[in-house]
Amino acid sequence: MAKYTPMMEQYLRIKADHQDAFLFFRLGDFYEMFFDDAINAARELEITLTKKNAGPKEPVPMCGVPYHSADNYIKNLIAKGYKVAICEQVEDPKAAKGVVKREVVQLITPGTVMESNMLSEKENNYIASLSHFDDGSYVIVYNDLSTGENSLAFVTHGWDAVIHELYNQPIKEIVVSSNLPEKWQEELRGKLNVTVSFQDEITFNGEYRNLCGELNDERLMKAFSRLLNYIQHTQKRSLDHLQPAKVIELKNFLSLDMYSKRNLELTETIIKKGKHGSLLWVLDRTVTAMGSRLLKKWLERPLINKNLIEKRLTIVDGFYQSFMERDSLRDALKSVYDLERLAGRIAFGNVNARDLIQLKHSLGKIPEIKNTLHQFGNKQINDLANNLVWPKEIGSLLEASLVEDPPVSVKEGSIIKAGYNETLDTYRDASKNGKQWIAELEQKEKQETNIKSLKIGYNRVFGYYIEVTKANLHLLPEGKYERKQTLTNAERYITPELKEKEQLILEAEEKSVELEYNLFIEIREQLKEQIPVLQALAEVVSKIDVLQAFATVSEANNYKRPSFAEDELTIKSGRHPVIEQVMKDGTFVPNDVHLDNNRDILLITGPNMSGKSTYMRQLALTAIMGQIGCFVPCEHAELLIFDQIFTRIGAADDLVSGQSTFMVEMLEANHAIANATEKSLILLDEIGRGTSTYDGMALAQAIVEYIHNNIQAKTLFSTHYHELTALENSLNKLKNVHVRAEEFEGNVVFLHQINDGAADESYGIHVAKLANLPEQLIERANTILNELENKDSKNNTVSDYDETAQLSFFVEEEKAEDKKKVKNSDSKVIKELENLDLFDMTPLQAMNELYRLQKLTK
Ligand code: ADP
Ligand code: MG
């Protein structure tokens, strides 16, 4: 077989080192891909697949994208979770002997993109690394390459906790050891939907020692090194904007498991996956991209330290009180550019002069912001103001050096101000004087030759020339001019003195453009040293922005400052922050909540659609708002500081995730029970719904009892099992509440009002009627209901409470009986049961399978 061409050999050598990425191989004005890369890229990018002769008989598959529009294609591949290795020609093709030398200059991956068109302004772009250690601990490192932020967290209680922690952070890519068990790698890919990358080198390479001050544990150093090594491997350049690594103590923040973050729709909604309709959507009154990102971070990690919460609230209070000043503050903040990402791009070397002018204007706003802050007359706000330092050096450097309206390109001059650099000024003078001289020459030649139409022009090929129309040629003296070009109507000439001047002008122009570029690079390098200053500034500005946003939204939506108590929670006229926004003004019905040490659990009953789920979520959202330092939707609130929030909410959403509803329910319930403390909040919404009535009810009751007796977490528990309301008699910290609904002329009217005591009736049929089911069907349902109720009252000889007690006994007995049967039956059934893949079945399939198995045992 014929050998590959030298270029293809070079390609194959480079590709061998980048198996997991699309290799964009630079050939002239195109990036080309070959072999499988070409086939896959043609499919993913919908571009034409062609072929190239590369030596052997069979041409190889090829496709390509133009160099100048590559960004969009790269963006597309990254968004799909792929990686792209950019391979450039690293020597001048003219100077090359043989094949032009090529190298991969950057590996772009979903977690390491820097290009602003691939980043979302209001979101961090995190890459994480995960390291596991022999003692069973894990360290997670987060980095946002666009802002330089680095943080680390220990996770000491198992793999599950790792997944919950990672799920709550918006990560795009995770770097792990190739020793991480395959099963876990799959879970990361599947549950978190992220790109998994590998880096096995975890020795610290010595660079970036200045970032490691807080890392006083060998495990932290190894984990951080894994990420740093990966980033260096992909970026292949110095990263001066990386910020010192911060250790996050997870136990210092309210912990939300992944179910809760999703169920409560804190940052995105379950179904549409968008911000609209989430708590973040309501609260985001920030005016800078930095602020918006910080708000999201705060929502992902609410506080549990009362002092820190109160500190935020005090500032929000200050902002809240003074509308006028807050308005000027917001105005000033609006003109502050994304300092954090700008710092990243300065380090990366991809800022232009326009960015720096924006930086100058942003910095120019700092004194105004500071002044405004001082006007609030609030000590905490004054402290914030004092942390805002106007970076004088940067300000004066930019002011002195850059013109106000520079072009996009930094390679074509017109960037640097006059007076900034003496040599540049001389070049500019030379060019200007030269042009002046030429203008004078034109006049002189006109007079001397008496040709009015004589002119001096310029083109790229011939430079400056004197143009004379054919009709006037006879007026030219002999020998003085040298003919250069003939046009239809005119001749163009040069003279030695014109060429001499031209030389000076062009040289000056060329030199000045080159010098401007160098000066710009110099300025950028000087700014690099100021990156930490910009980052510190960004941190304060984003904090101010979030806190003003809290004040703004609190005023707009009439929220109240909460206080915090040790063992009692009271909310007067509380509202659901999101639902009240999507409803017409004033139609949301406020409700009270009261929980204390004798009232740990509220068992909520009431008809469908009456507002049970809303009431439960409302409490969790209010707690979270309080713990991030925002005012809360109510008339008055005394809150508890929760250490964790667990939720089991809603059934509809699980259909989307593909797991069997009941299994998800049990996983979520188990997660709550295994981790909650008496300082936690648990929301269990209609648990047990996904299985048969007795089974479900038995489980629901057992779960409530367990929480009541063993955990004592504050719990809201809604149920459609009426029988459970009898638990109030046996569990002294459980209280019944119900949502009122009234019947009016045969229809049910929801009042959405929560009252003490149990609900008395199920309004299912009325709801069906509201949904416009056929009249005939509704009548039939009413008849059946009456029959059932009559039957029930005949059998019903024991009190409600006894009935449930009996019921759970009955269920237990039924289970024991089942066990016996299974034991005696064919072991084939057991085998089949063992082999069932529950996660891969719909509830209906499971039901059918059960039915078939049961038949086998009979
Ligand atoms: P349930 O869980 O009892 O079935 P939901 O909490 O899902 O009921 O509420 C059903 C609908 O009723 C909500 O979508 C909302 O439109 C409305 N709703 C709930 N609570 C209130 C309230 N307090 N005020 C006004 N409308 C409400
Ligand atoms: Mg509900």
Image: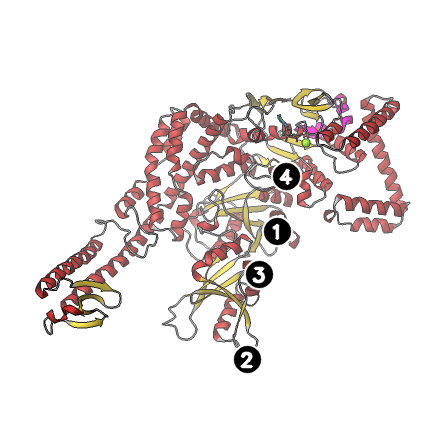
In the rendered view, tell whether residue 487 sits above or below residue 805: below
Earlier-in-chain disc, 4 versus 2 = 2
Disc 3 crowd rating (10 Å Cα; few below 14, some 14-19, many 20+) is few
Residue corresponding to mark 1? 189
**Nearer to us: label 3 or label 1:** 3
**Can residue 529 be seen here?**
no
Q: How is the image coloured?
A: secondary structure
Residue corresponding to mark 3? 43
In the rendered view, tell whether residue 567 sits above or below residue 682: above
- Contact (CB < 8 A) between labels 3 and 4? no
Q: Image point 27% across, 51% down: which residue?
A: 416
Query: Does residue 515 appear left or right of residue 152 in this picture?
Result: left
How far apart in space, not on screen, are marks 4 and 1 (Cα)?
Answer: 18 Å
Earlier-in-chain disc, 3 versus 2 = 2
Residue corresponding to mark 2? 2
**Which of the pair 119/391 is nearer the observer?**
119
Earlier-in-chain disc, 2 versus 1 = 2
Q: Residue furthest bottom?
A: 1
